[in-house]
Image (spheres, rainbow, N blue to C red):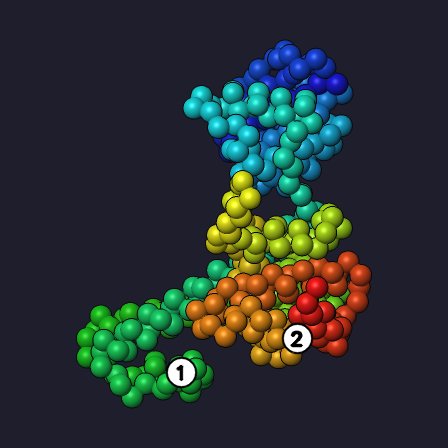
Amino acid sequence: MHYVGLDVHARRSSLCILDSCGRPVKRLEVRGPWPKLLAQVAAQVPRPFAVCFEASCGYGYLHERLSALAGRVAVAHPGRLRLIFRSKRKHDRADAEKLATLLYLDQVPGVHVPAAGVRAWRGLVELRRKLVGRRTAVKAQLRALLRSAGACDAPAGKALWSKRGLKWLAAVALSAEADALRRDLLLEELGQAEARLARVTAELDKRAAAHPGVALLRTIPGVGPRTAEAFVAYVDDVRRFARTRQVGCYLGLVPCQDSSAGRDRLGHITGDGPATVRMLLCEAAWQAVRRSPSMRAFFERVTHGEPGRKKIALVAAAHKLARAMAAMLRTGEAWREQEQEQEQEQEQEPA
């Protein structure tokens, strides 16, 4: 068995091959796109071999192509690699050798590689988030334009974005010609953003309807289709987590911990994992606190009646929600409010 480390870039890659005893036998520099790299791997690496590379943009495509050539393909976690190798001597050839060495030692900090359909689903989730953000930015610019032009009679709140409000906005008289041009261009961009958002949402609805896990998670009070589909898409196979609490670590909802000599210090949340899912879970937690008695009781227990602890309690509620969602996907059971209330009572009972 040979062990191959790849330091992959868009137009240039480095390759290091170790033999069965862990000794370097060949190093290659490949200039060109990934198809040329794959051709060099197929031609230069002795069989059988295992290969390791660092996760980056497009790692799923590379994993699929290398799986057809190698007996084993390991994708390394970039953040954990930096913790393992904190060296001032860093270049492509050295990185390729380090990856090959970790593969030989069977110490690769691996990442989950979802299927192509799941990766496409995640891409749509992220695209929708960016489109919503762009739409919000355009609306804010239109509001600022009206305020700077002194249009105090503009409809308040969401009424400005209704059909009647947009018609009024397009016809409102602006003193400066440049302001009128800005208004017209922003309205045009808003219409395009709405149309694109509708197309993406329709495709997401189609994918969500075909996945039973999304309908299952929507039984939770406050969890809508966007939160459920994002959670299902990013968690993918919930069985890859040994325990449900590991899902909270994956989503970055657990606090940083510094424990030494009997002292345990907890800081802000780690913020690891997909930020989109974390944001949607926090939004869903607000709704769950309002609609679910058990989540409301949990929220109040964490706040201790202190207004300054509301944000901490919200993140804790989002963490609890994520663990409940993972457990539901694992067991296939829907949300049951009575059992959640019983768990709350058991947690409050003194030991």
In this picture, residue 7 sits left or right of residue 147: right
Task: Name the residue nearer the viewer: 282 or 258.
Answer: 258
Q: Is residue 13 visible?
A: no
Tell me which residue sits at (69%, 27%) in the image.
106
Tell me which residue sits at (77%, 70%) in the image.
334
Mark 2 sits on what residue? 294
User: What is the x, y in percent for residue 72?
Assistant: 73, 30
In the rendered image, the residue lying farthest to the left is 176
In this picture, residue 253 sits left or right of residue 166: right
Dot 1 and dot 2 residues touching (CB under 8 Å): no
User: What is the x, y in percent for residue 64?
Assistant: 69, 37
User: What is the x, y in percent for residue 311?
Assistant: 48, 66
Tell me which residue sits at (62%, 13%) in the image.
24
User: What is the x, y in percent for residue 277?
Assistant: 57, 59
Q: Which mark is residue 44?
A: none
Depicted 54 relative to depicted 176: above or below: above
Q: Secondary structure at mark 2?
A: helix
Residue type at the position of mark 1? Gly
Residue type at the position of mark 2? Ser
How many other residues sit within 10 Å of disc 2, few (<14), some (14-19) or many (≥20)? many
Mark 1 sits on what residue? 157
Residue 3 appears in which quarter of the rendering? top right
In this picture, residue 315 sits left or right of residue 221: left
Residue 177 appears in which quarter of the rendering? bottom left
Task: Name the residue nearer the viewer: 277 or 107.
Answer: 107
